[in-house]
Amino acid sequence: MIDLDHVTVTYPGRARPVLHEVSWHVPDGDLAVVVGRTGTGKSTLLGALCGLVPHHSGGTVAGTVCVAGRPTSAHRPAELADVVGYVGQDPSAGFVTDRVEDEVAYGMEQLGVDPAAMRKRVEETLDLMGIADLRRRGLATLSGGQQQRVAIAAVLAAQPRVLVLDEPTSALDPTAAQDVLAALTALVHDVGLTVVLAEHRLERVMDAADTMAWLDGTGGVVAGDPADVLARADVTPPLAALSDALGWSRVALSVREARRRVQREQVRVVAPPPPARAEGEVLLVARDVTVSYGDVPAVTGVSLELRAGTVTALMGRNGSGKSSLLWALQGSVGGGETKVTGRVTRGLAPAEARRLVGLVPQTAADLLYLPTVAEELAQADRDAGAAGGTAAAVLAGLGVSLPGDAHPRDLSEGQRLALVLAVQLAARPRVVLLDEPTRGLDYAAKQALAATLRTLADQGRAVVVATHDVEFAAEATDDTVLLADGDVVARGATRTVCTGSPAFAPQVAKVFAPVPVLTVADVRGSA
């Protein structure tokens, strides 16, 4: 179905090609997963499959890419729409209508599908993706995860033979991600759809993969059986790290496989003692916080306290109110009262608010608007009333070095996140809020982020991370607050909350349940 023959992709101004002499075959009806560190060319490879590379991206392509017998270099994306559908990392960037139902139907309208058939396909696709209740909602009112599911539905409705997805579960909570992947797997197994997806959260998809391709950072690709590829790759999902820790020669691809092997080999682990509870100063006190959008409540009477020295995970289903709660704590929206070091956050002048609470939004690049890194850092100093060089020093303290003349849009996701964090920290806020900061980050970048958050906490700040990434929460946070329908349904130590929740438990916890271990480090420590 998909054939790449000695494909080399080179962009203008680049000294080296992004892909070099890549050959890869994906059989009809396979689910193929593309893995690799940030910046190794995963999005370029996916773009080449649907004609976005080079027709929209520019650059040159040598070799041939054929999908269903059509060379993508000779066909623009619109000419391939009946064969290959594509969903990018930012679903909202591809929307062309205002309502969910209209968006799902739009692609079929462009392909001239009969209205009766179109209506049937819309209904089937809405049900398949579990979004029938959203059909009349405005796209702008949806959460990031809901938008992701609509984008996938809009492509599926056209019934392509190949579906290409870039980070399809990055904005989804664990349950929603499982539903989406189950739907994709059913299409592969039952309908014969060929699916190619790139995903940083390999723990979600690797057990479903028929084949895997690892971009090794030199422009080359290593493809084959997923277990064999993961044994060589420089990306290490939790089960791969666990397999290494236990001395297994073959990587376990699923919790079930790992759990059975642990039982067969009688591996014994002991839960580590509870960590010492932080007794730092109470920095933030929120009482009866509410947020509504028209008649739709998003947060309903949440109260909480945050102490210096703690990193808290804020988790819950898509649409549970996590982002709304963060913005309410920052003082931009909502009712109730939030105080930081005794001062009410709502209604403060921007400069004063920044000194109390710094918020990194879900799309960090939304805060970047100047043409170079150096100008962004200098403007952050001016906005914060800080001495020149403060933001640059914060960036260096995060262990990140960026060219001052680089444009922010040319940075990787991890680099942009670090830049925005430095911009926000220039004002030295006591409370730092981050909304889904791990989207687009590989495992190494997430480890670096976890270390950064710990440093901030050790400096006497309170840090809150809204995230769907349960593996990151297990590694990086002390406490967890679980939201549902805008209300707190669980709170406490991360070890207690996450090991007690099937939906929000990390993979290691599932392997060793009911023993309350969270991470591979726990397993190594008990060996």
Image (spheres, grey):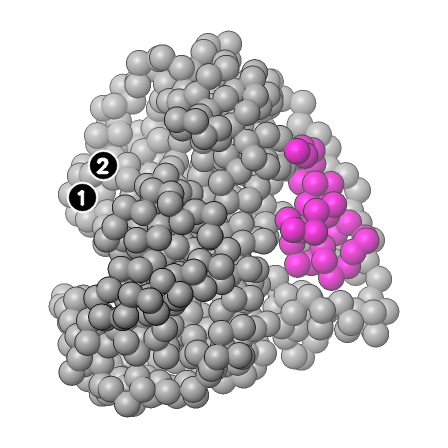
Tell me the CA gap for discs 2 and 1.
Answer: 6 Å
**Secondary-structure class at tag 1:** loop
Residue at x 65%, y 69% (from the top left corner)? 254
Q: Is residue 197 visible?
A: yes
**Above or below 270: residue 219:** below
Label 2: few (<14), some (14–19) or many (≥20) C-alpha neighbours in 10 Å? many
65 within the magenta span: no
Q: Residue at x 57, y 53 (%)?
A: 174
Q: Percent position (x, y) of residue 517?
A: 74, 51
The image quadrant where one finds the N terminus is: bottom left
The local crowd at label 1, few if under 14, some if 14 to 19, many if 20 or more residues have their Cα within 10 Å, is some
Query: Which stretch appears magenta?
Result: 489-518
Residue 487 at x, y = what percent?
A: 59, 30
Q: Position of residue 313 (x, y in %)?
A: 57, 38
- Left or right: where does residue 480 sit relative to residue 452? right
Residue 294, quarter of the rendered image: top left
Quick check: 401 above or below 3?
Answer: above
Q: Is residue 140 above or below residue 225?
A: above
Residue 400 seen in this snapshot: no
Q: Amino acid at mark 2?
A: Glu
Q: On the rendered structure, is 105 left or right of 525?
A: left
Residue 372: numbered disc: 1
Out of 344 and 128, give the one closest to the viewer: 128
| Residue 403 left/right relative to 526 | left
- Asked if the residue under mark 1 is in contact with the one under mark 2, i.e. CB atoms within 8 Å, the reply is yes
The local secondary structure at tag 2 comes to: helix
Kind of residue indicated by mark 1: Thr
- Up the image or down, 125 lies above or below 460; here it is below
Dividing the image into 4 quarters, which one contains the C terminus?
bottom right
Question: Residue 62: horizontal and vertical position, in percent?
Answer: 19, 84
Checking the image for residue 376, the label placed there is 2
